[in-house]
Image: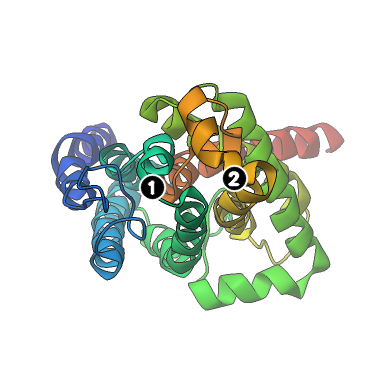
Amino acid sequence: MRKAIFEWVSLVLAVLILGPVAGLLPAMLRSPAGSGEATALTSKAPLFGIALSLGALAIAAVVGMFGSKTVTRPMGMACAGFTLVWVACRSGRAEMIFRESSSPVTSAWMMAIEAAILTIPVLWVVTLVQKPRPIDADENAVALTEVRTGLLEGLKALVRDYRGLLGVAAALIGAAFGCALGSISLLKGQCVFAGVLAGIGAGCAGGLVIAGIDSKPSLAPYVGVMLTAILAPIVTIFMQGSGLASAAITGDLLPVGRLIPMDWIAGMFLGVPWGLSWVSGMVKDQLAAAA
């Protein structure tokens, strides 16, 4: 009963209270043209934009830690993700950013740099959200879906075994594939949904690779998604180049070029634990069958 109550409290806190508050932060940004179609670095005040993004991540961390402590770590990740969905939805759309920009290629580079700047803070939030010990948790069992290490230790675990880096590469490919499946229109909701599918793809692909590693480099799928967020605008630049603005107008942007960094980030928090849980279930079934 207590757990069910806290599940609802956590979700209400994320979806209806602190999520909307976090969404107010990117809504304060303005593009050089004066509209609300902007991300942190494509806005008129890039440093202010990064500060607002970090503030939104801090709110997501608080909500996520509450969900992890009172329910489970996957619930904490979901609460952080729902909070960041508000942030993504109140940010600009890539399509409109490219349309309004005097240099769409520069705007795309700015989004790649923005994703790179936010990578370490985002990964830190992932470890913070999963740091609290859930009240009813069995800490003796290490779940594939959970990150039990700090940020530095988690990053070291990636290079401790070459399969950790393979997990990152697999997650990157899975994220791109998931995004391509979901990014069928330029609508903001569809872009966020594509981000969630990217997270699921990264969790599945990366999880399959890291499932047998003793060091459990659970950050691999998350690193893979963030690398995809960095590379996606760059790939879009090289594939569409000077035709970026016209592609935005005609709706022909590459699927991975339709997402802004926060779409990837919000989708990562929601999707990666989901994908990892599927892999974890498959591994348990195989172990049970082998026994």
How many residues crowd mark 1 within 10 Å: few (<14), some (14–19), many (20+)? some
- SS at badge 1: loop
Amino acid beneath label 2:
Ser
Amino acid type assigned to the residue bearing label 1 in the image: Ser
Which dot marks residue 190?
none
Q: Quadrant of residue 282?
A: top right
Please identify the quadrant where the N terminus is shown. top left
Relative to 153, residue 198 above or below: above
The quadrant where residue 155 appears:
bottom right
Q: Residue furthest right?
A: 290
The Cα atoms of the two marked residues, 1 and 2, are separated by: 13 Å
Give the percent coordinates (x, y) of residue 66.
Answer: 26, 52
Instruction: Please state the horizontal and vertical placement of residue 58, each as a whole percent of the image.
Output: 27, 62
The residue identified by callout 1 is: 101
Indicate the quadrant where residue 87 lies.
top left
Residue 214 percent across, percent down from the top left: 74, 64
Check disc 2 and report the residue beneath it. Answer: 242
